[in-house]
Amino acid sequence: MSKPPPKPVKPGQVKVFRALYTFEPRTPDELYFEEGDIIYITDMSDTNWWKGTSKGRTGLIPSNYVAEQAESIDNPLHEAAKRGNLSWLRECLDNRVGVNGLDKAGSTALYWACHGGHKDIVEMLFTQPNIELNQQNKLGDTALHAAAWKGYADIVQLLLAKGARTDLRNNEKKLAFDMATNAACASLLKKKQGTGKSSGCHWERRLEAQLSDWSAAGGVSCWSWCLWLGLSVGNGCMAPRAKTLLHDYGTSTSSASVATET
C-alpha cells in the first residue's frame, strides 16, 4: 500500500523531506538530489510537479516521487535547535522554514535551544525579525522558563536583553524566577523584575522547605548552609527572618555572618 500524499504546503510554510533514493533529472528544470539529502518543498500548487530546494539548488520534483520515495521531517527547525546543529538550523532558515512553528508540545525552536543551552542557536534565531520570545507551550512554559530551570544564566541574559517577559506564569502558576535553579539566573530575573520584599517571601518559603528537608535528614553541612543563606539574602529574603528560620530548625548561625537589614 502506497503512503498517503503529503498535505499541501500552506502559504508561507515549507515542507521538509529526506530523500530515500537518488533522483536523476531528465530535464534542466528538474532537481538532482542524492539519497539522504534534505529537500525543502516550497510550492505544491502543481499536482504533478513540486518546486523544491536542496543544497542551494532549486528545481522541479515529481510529486509522486516525494510522496513515495522521501521521508517527511516534522519540525526540522526544532530538531536542529535540540541538537545544537547550527548549520542545519541556518539551512532551514535560509529555506524559509517558519521560525515560530510549534511542535506537538506547543514549543518553539527557541524554547528547545534555550532548554538545551545552545547559545549559538539562540543568537542565530534572534537574527530573525519576527522571532516570538514569549510563546507558551502546553505546560505554559516559555523559553525564559526553560533557560532559568536549566540554569543557563548566559541565555537568560540574552532573552532578557531581547525583551522576554518575566511576568508570564506557567500552568503551575510559576514565573521564570520561581523556576531558577541557581543564584545567577535568579539574580538576573530579580533585577529585571525589580522585585523587592515580595521576592523575599518566595525565597523564605524555599529556605524553609530546604531547612525542613535538612532537619529530616539529621543535619546540614556548613557549605550547604552558606549557599542557601546567600541565595535567600541575595534574593530579597530579610536577614532577621532568615536567622529566625535557621534558629527554628536548630541550625547554628555562628559560622557565617548574616547582613542585617538597614
Image (cartoon, rainbow, N blue to C red):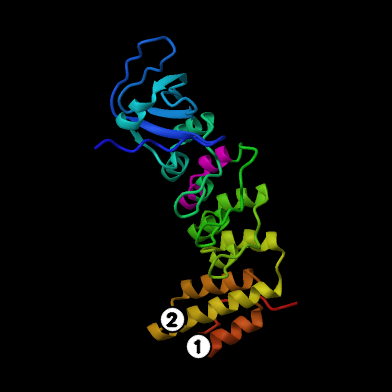
The answer to whether residue 117 is left or right of residue 200 is left
Residue identifier under label 2 = 214
Q: Give the amino acid type for the residue marked by disc 2 in the picture.
A: Trp
The magenta stretch spans residue 120:
yes
Circle 1 crowding by C-alpha within 10 Å: few under 14, some 14–19, many from 20: some
- Image quadrant where residue 253 sits: bottom right
Residue appearing at x 56%, y 50% in the figure: 155
Residue appearing at x 54%, y 65% in the figure: 179
The answer to whether residue 223 is left or right of residue 1 is right
Reply above or below: 232 against 52.
Answer: below
Point out residue 32 in the picture as x, y percentages from the top left corner.
37, 17
Q: In terms of secondary structure, where does tag 2 sit?
A: helix
Point out residue 215 in the picture as x, y percentages from the top left corner.
43, 85
The magenta stretch spans residue 6:
no
Circle 2 crowding by C-alpha within 10 Å: few under 14, some 14–19, many from 20: some
Point out residue 232 in the picture as x, y percentages from the top left corner.
59, 73
Point out residue 66 in the picture as x, y percentages from the top left corner.
36, 29
Q: Which of 172/1 is in front? A: 1
State yes or no: discs 1 and 2 in contact (Cβ < 8 Å).
Answer: yes
Majority secondary structure in the magenta region: helix
Q: Which of 190/44 is in front? A: 44
Instruction: Please provide the residue range marked out in magenta.
Output: 112-125
Q: Give the amino acid type for the residue marked by disc 1 in the picture.
A: Tyr
Q: In terms of secondary structure, where does tag 1 sit?
A: loop
Reply above or below: 19 against 149.
Answer: above
Residue appearing at x 42%, y 9% in the figure: 28
The answer to whether residue 159 is left or right of residue 139 is right
Residue identifier under label 1 = 249
**The C terminus lies in quadrant:** bottom right
Label for residue 221?
none
Q: Which of 59/172 is in front? A: 59
Q: Which of 58/68 is in front? A: 68
